[in-house]
Image (tube, helix red, strand yellow):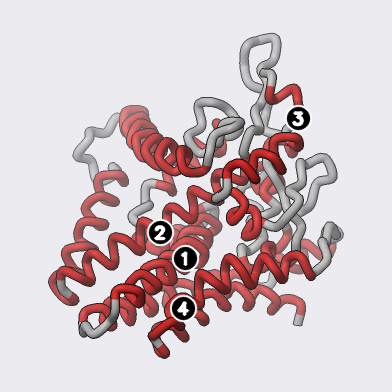
Amino acid sequence: MKDLKYLAAFSIPAVAFLGLYLKGYWVWATPVFAFVCIPVLELIFPVDTKNLKADEAEHQLKKKVFDWLLYLNLPLVYGLIILALYTVSTGGLATYELMGLILSVGIVLGVNGINVGHELGHRQTTNERFIGKALLLPSFYMHFYIEHNYGHHLNAATPEDPATARYNQSVYSFWFTSAIRQYFSAWKIQLKLLKNNGQSFFSFKNDMFWYLIIQVAYIIAVILVFGKLAMIFAILSGIVGFILLETVNYIEHYGLIRLKTKSGRYERVREVHSWNSNHVIGRIVLYELTRHSDHHYKSSKKYQVLDCHDESPQMPYGYPTSMVLAMLPPLWFKIMNKRVPEAMVTS
């Protein structure tokens, strides 16, 4: 039964489906559930720092149920999008209902779309990577696959990394700097890969070009099938989805910087360069994303066997709660700045 605890990750799309069905003020149930109910539960439930033993981890890796719990997000996410687009296109929704649905669908796109796409994007099989990229599509963040895998994991906790928030940088500033810099970084990485392989810009191997075509085709398909209002809804929901991702990026490495060695190079990425949280609710809902240091230590390591490292800087709250705090910069700085190692602040 413990293996099925990750079914709780489907609670957010379940609430979103409920809101779509009941409409009215129920369309706001998803943001309330994600950023009020879950943070309250995180404060109630205890922190769990236990790690699996070597034989237990090996046993867990053999269980396909953990993979299928990820794959199921694909029909759930796309089913929700199609139902939401149909509901919007039929008309009759009040402005407050449309706003609630945009936030609700956007939250699902961020949590069950991009987050799961991130996990699958680190897998070795083509099919799993395909599902991961498909989950990035509705948020218009397919370039994340390239920048995250070939950029962020190399440059994390350095000024060169778009997805590392600077000390005293607000989350609102970070949304813009990270989103814009990551997109251009993805193109830079793509062009370098093409050059290294002796291929031209118009090569079939230019994934960034294909991502652009696919995402534009998605928008065109939405407007042709569901109309202009649905297209606007799809775009705004996608924006909410990637803003949610960028908020997570913000709290994952805020203020943490790799120091330079005598040779002038940055020290290797270590456990101290990511903020971690062992609050069980956030861990389950986000498929152990909160054990971020271990993910950077070995990015191909599956979520169900990620470890807690004692030397990793710990957040006082879970990731969902921390995301809410980040929206209040003065409070965020007051709580988090004193936790950033002094050597990193003065570097």
The residue that mark 2 highlights is: 240
- Discs 4, 1 touching: Cβ within 8 Å: yes
- Determine which residue is flagged by label 3: 341
Q: Position of residue 71 (x, y in %)?
A: 50, 72
Q: CA distance from mark 4 to mark 1?
A: 9 Å
The residue carrying pointer 2 sits among few (fewer than 14), some (14 to 19) or many (20 or more) residues within 10 Å by Cα, namely: many
Q: Amino acid at mark 2?
A: Val
Q: Is residue 23 left or right of residue 120?
A: left
| Spatial CA span between label 2 and label 1 | 7 Å
- State yes or no: discs 4 and 3 in contact (Cβ < 8 Å): no
Along the horizontal axis of the image, is 319 left or right of 47?
A: left
Callout 1 amino acid: Ile
Q: Are marks 2 and 1 in contact (CB under 8 Å)?
A: yes
For numbered disc 2, what is the local secondary structure?
Answer: helix
Nearer to the camera, 222 or 325: 325
Tag 2 or tag 4, which sits nearer the N-term? 4
According to the picture, the residue beneath numbered tag 4 turns out to be: 16
Do we see residue 26 in this rendering?
yes
